[in-house]
Amino acid sequence: MTARAADRARYDRATAQLDAPVAIVDLDAFDANADDLVRRAGGKPIRVASKSVRCRALLERALAKDGFAGIMSFTLAESLWLARSGFDDVLLAYPSADRAAYAELAADPKLARAVTVMADDPAQLDMIDAAREGGREVVRVCLELDTSLKLLGGRVRVGARRSPLHSPAQVADMARAVARRPGFALVGIMAYEGHVAGVGDAVAGRPLRSRAIRLMQEAARRELAERRAAVVRAVRAVAPDLEFVNGGGTGSVQHTAAEDAVTEIAAGSGLYVPRLFDNYTSFRGRPAALFAQPVVRRPGVGVVTVLGGGYPASGAAGADRLPVPYLPEGLRYDPQEGAGEVQTPLFGSPADDLLIGDKVWFRHAKAGELCERFDTLHLVEGDRVTAAVPTYRGEGHTFL
């Protein structure tokens, strides 16, 4: 029996009394992935990216481990909810336009101590001030550095379009805008190198593309390390008490951690290891989060139909954004139908061994987005479900 077949047998036994659709997290795999992130971080703390987890119980599990400290959130409303729930170090990774939430933040000492907001434009500070409604708490601010690699005099850009702050001078100007403004405290810098941390460099069947990605990433790492160090020096000249410099992501942990200027690493997807993280040479994780759909039809030889399953991930549309049939091994989509809203045909010889009601296990393309489809995650240890915990959705929250 292969390792994957053994996993399937375990998951089927663990969920035998549960009807599909059902989502699980394999805690042995989750913990092993967490330990590997800590090893790769080389002693620098890992801030957990909540968008990749979206389950309070599993955020708590990760943060209870040595080597993890703090949360990187994705909306201001989520940040406040987490802070009220007892998380005392929440960095909002994206600027917000939520005026009501800013008013809450500025009026509550506990929230103001726990939450740090993101800014890359003085207009964002104007919005916060306009939203205060009398709240006088000091708002903690982190500046985001644009990490994109610019080539040929800026005519070619590689990387996500995030912050407009690219050069040390631009970031220092924004730091001065925060420092001279009453009611704000500059406490951190963040730089997410998504073109390194979030792009696999070992694309199956594409050796030339994989080589090109590796060359790009090597150049990007070198350029960013030098520029990030210069940015930190420039900002510390304005704010010498800067508390943290956050960088990286699951795919670049060890590379980012090697930079002296970086004090902490961000990672989240590496806990669940969705399918988009299969294509990396820098690490190998264990799939920890899966979902099962039930077989509801057997239309013919070599084909079964499962209920639902059309859960595409965000990003540029393509086959890599679809969940992948994972267990039993050897199933594939009908290219004419793909993953369907209410039914999904699957081809392959394993289909002939599946009966009505059997489970087919899938892996989602991205990490936390799976939790927007399920209210509950069933936690598996060995061949038993030992707990059932709510996702954000299960607690009544869909922040985006």
Image: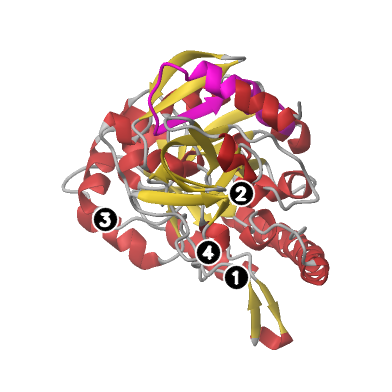
Q: What segment carries the magenta color?
A: 10-36
**122 w.r.t. 30: above or below:** below
Residue 291, given in percent of the width and then of the height, sits at 48, 36
The CA span between labels 3 and 1 is 25 Å
Pointer 4 local density, CA inside 10 Å: few below 14, some 14–19, many at least 20: few
The CA span between labels 2 and 4 is 13 Å
Q: Which residue is mark 2?
A: 348
Answer with left or right where residue 398 lies relative to residue 295: left
**Which quadrant is home to the N terminus?**
top right
Q: Which residue is mark 3?
A: 129
Asked whether the beta carbons under mark 2 and mark 3 sit within 8 Å of each other, the answer is no
The CA span between labels 3 and 4 is 52 Å
What's under tag 1, amino acid-wise? His
- Total of numbered circles in the picture? 4
What's under tag 2, amino acid-wise? Gly
Q: Nearer the viewer, residue 81 or 382?
A: 382
Would you say residue 279 is visible in this rendering?
yes
The CA span between labels 1 and 4 is 42 Å
Q: Which residue is mark 4?
A: 335
Mark in front: 3 vs 1: 1
Residue 319, given in percent of the width and then of the height, sits at 55, 62
What's under tag 4, amino acid-wise? Pro
Q: Nearer the viewer, residue 97 or 388?
A: 388
